[in-house]
Image (spheres, rainbow, N blue to C red):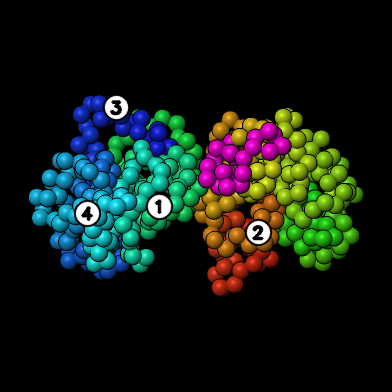
């Protein structure tokens, strides 16, 4: 897995090196990496580096210094460079190094009301940006967030962010209005939480990490990113004598007369994720549909049937019998995936064990509200790791928070994130498919599913496989949850 750190952790790790007088070396290493990846983007976009035109928005702190040193390196490779200074000062040594290359410097101070001179300089900066091939955003670094005003950047101009898009909170991913979206973010020291979750994930574009020598002093990561190489190890495989019971038995409580299709999606995904046996609880209409679409499924008499794990909630809506079955499973303390309407049956501080809750932001708002935490879905989307951790503690359960980053957390804060979900997963029914896939993996997980960290990693692996299945499902140009359920378990083939 890839370790991820908050901006606060990165700054703390840097502080000792700065006190030891290594600040100049850190900045030059960072600038070298920024220039290297900028040149790679220029080659990819335009076929050459020499003769390209690059401008950088330069802030007043070390982030601006990184940008100026990077411009100096680019100028040495035949790039025509312009530094647009935003503020009343710039890193002096870096600015001097850039001036020695003969590069152009523009005072691009953000205009104040009634300040005609600054308004003219702001206009000069905007005009300069219309005549370049790429812009570097080096205004704010990890130590600064908040609202900012930048010169107008043409929409089709490639943007490279220095360390992170200016204004993004490196700890949380929260971002104010006015942040310049990047095509590429070149970040220093380690991957940062704010580039992986929240708005920061969407604003960062592709992320490249430049090693500046912090690994030995970073400590424990804030979270981890699951990668494709991890998934095989995290996906349970049957061993020993193989028969349908040894390969995991999943119980599924899904569907209602109002939403029968959700049961079919979850059941299809479960059997295609290689569960040994699927037992289902559903009203007459969804049960009939499952019997036709998923003939492997075996109807169960009730929630006291023998299973290794449960998946509960897709499409049950307000069906009283289905909700009663969910409550019976919760009371029996069996391992389960709890989704959709089944989440409403949960009560905070009940000492649950072996549960994976799979809310989206709106459902997490409801869960937290019932635990006495007043927060909105917008708050959750701005700082998703924080609020997923609150819910994990409040319900003594692993929480898988769905979104453009899928965040899986344990009550002790252990967090693994999957970043590979494509945009088409934001479609009706895809969550039902994830529930079926995760339920099947939980049923076959054996002892892995008995530890909270194991559950977190299992949930992250399921989310990753869900994203890969979406890529397979979308290869022919069409996409829908039905197709996604059919290819579940066949990701990457």
Q: Which of marks 1 and 4 is nearer the N terminus?
A: 4
Location of mark 3 (residue): 16
Rate crowding at label 1 as few (under 14), some (14 to 19) or many (20 or more) other CA atoms within 10 Å. Answer: many
Q: What element carries label 4?
A: helix
The crowd level at tag 4 (other Cα within 10 Å; few <14, some 14-19, many 20+) is few
Q: To which quarter of the image does residue 272 belong?
A: bottom right
Which of discs 1 and 2 lies nearer the camera? The answer is 1
Q: Distance between the residues labelled 4 and 2?
A: 54 Å
Query: Could you tell me residue 211's position as x and y percent?
Result: 31, 42
- Residue behind mark 2: 430
Q: Which residue is drawn at 23% across and 26% down?
A: 20
Asked whether the viewer can see residue 243, the reply is no
Quote the CA–CA distance across marks 2 and 3.
Answer: 47 Å
SS assignment at label 1: loop
Q: Give the range drawn in magenta.
A: 369-389
Residue where numbered disc 1 is placed: 179
Figure quadrant of the C terminus: bottom right
User: Mark 3 or 1 closer to N-term?
Assistant: 3
The answer to which of marks 2 and 3 sits earlier in the sequence is: 3
* Residue name at image x 57 percent, y 51 percent: 403
Q: Does the magenta stretch include residue 381?
A: yes
User: Which comes sooner in the sequence, label 1 or label 2?
Assistant: 1
């Amino acid at each position: 897995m890839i370790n991820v750190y908050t901006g606060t952790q990165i700054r703390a790790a840097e502080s000792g090196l700065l006190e030891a007088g290594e600040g100049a070396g850190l900045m030059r290493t960072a600038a070298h990496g920024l220039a290297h990846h900028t040149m790679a983007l220029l080659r990819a976009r335009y076929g050459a580096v020499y003769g390209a035109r690059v401008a950088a928005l330069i802030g007043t702190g070390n982030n601006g210094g990184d940008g100026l040193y990077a411009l100096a390196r680019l100028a040495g490779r035949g790039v025509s460079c312009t530094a647009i200074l935003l503020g009343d000062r710039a890193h002096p040594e870096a600015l001097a190094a850039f001036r020695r290359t003969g590069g152009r410097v523009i005072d691009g101070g953000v205009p104040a009301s009634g300040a005609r001179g600054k308004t003219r300089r702001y206009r000069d900066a905007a005009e300069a940006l219309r005549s370049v091939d790429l812009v570097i955003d080096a205004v704010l670094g990890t130590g600064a967030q908040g609202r900012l005003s930048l010169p107008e950047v043409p929409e089709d101009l490639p943007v490279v962010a220095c360390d992170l898009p200016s204004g993004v909170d490196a700890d949380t991913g929260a971002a104010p209005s006015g942040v310049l979206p990047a095509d590429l973010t070149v970040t220093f020291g380690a991957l940062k939480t704010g580039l992986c979750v929240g708005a920061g994930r969407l604003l960062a574009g592709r992320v490249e990490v430049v090693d500046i020598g912090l690994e030995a002093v970073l400590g424990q990561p804030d979270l981890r990113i699951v990668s494709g190489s991890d998934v095989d190890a995290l996906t349970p495989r049957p061993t020993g004598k193989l028969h349908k019971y040894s390969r995991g038995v999943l119980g599924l409580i899904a569907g209602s007369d109002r939403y029968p299709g959700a049961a079919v999606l979850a059941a299809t995904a479960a059997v295609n994720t290689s569960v040994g046996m699927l037992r289902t609880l559903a009203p007459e209409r969804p049960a009939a549909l499952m019997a036709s679409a998923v003939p492997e499924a075996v109807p169960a008499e009730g929630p006291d049937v023998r299973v290794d794990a449960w998946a509960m909630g897709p499409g049950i809506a307000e069906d009283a019998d289905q909700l009663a079955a969910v409550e019976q499973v919760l009371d029996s303390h069996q391992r389960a995936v709890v989704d959709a309407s089944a989440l409403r049956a949960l009560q905070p501080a009940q000492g649950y064990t072996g549960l994976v809750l799979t809310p989206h932001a709106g459902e997490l708002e409801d869960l937290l509200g019932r635990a006495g935490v007043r927060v909105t879905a917008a708050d959750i989307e701005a700082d998703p790791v924080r609020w997923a951790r609150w819910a994990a503690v409040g319900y003594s359960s692993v929480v898988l928070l769905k979104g453009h980053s899928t965040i899986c957390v344990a009550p002790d804060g252990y967090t693994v994130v999957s970043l590979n979900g494509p945009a088409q997963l934001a479609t009706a029914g895809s969550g039902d498919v994830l529930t079926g896939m995760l339920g099947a993996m939980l049923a076959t997980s054996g002892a892995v599913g008995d530890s909270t960290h194991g559950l977190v990693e299992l949930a992250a692996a399921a989310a990753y496989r869900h994203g890969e299945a979406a890529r397979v499902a979308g290869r022919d140009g069409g996409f829908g949850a039905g197709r996604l359920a059919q290819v579940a378990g066949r990701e990457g083939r």
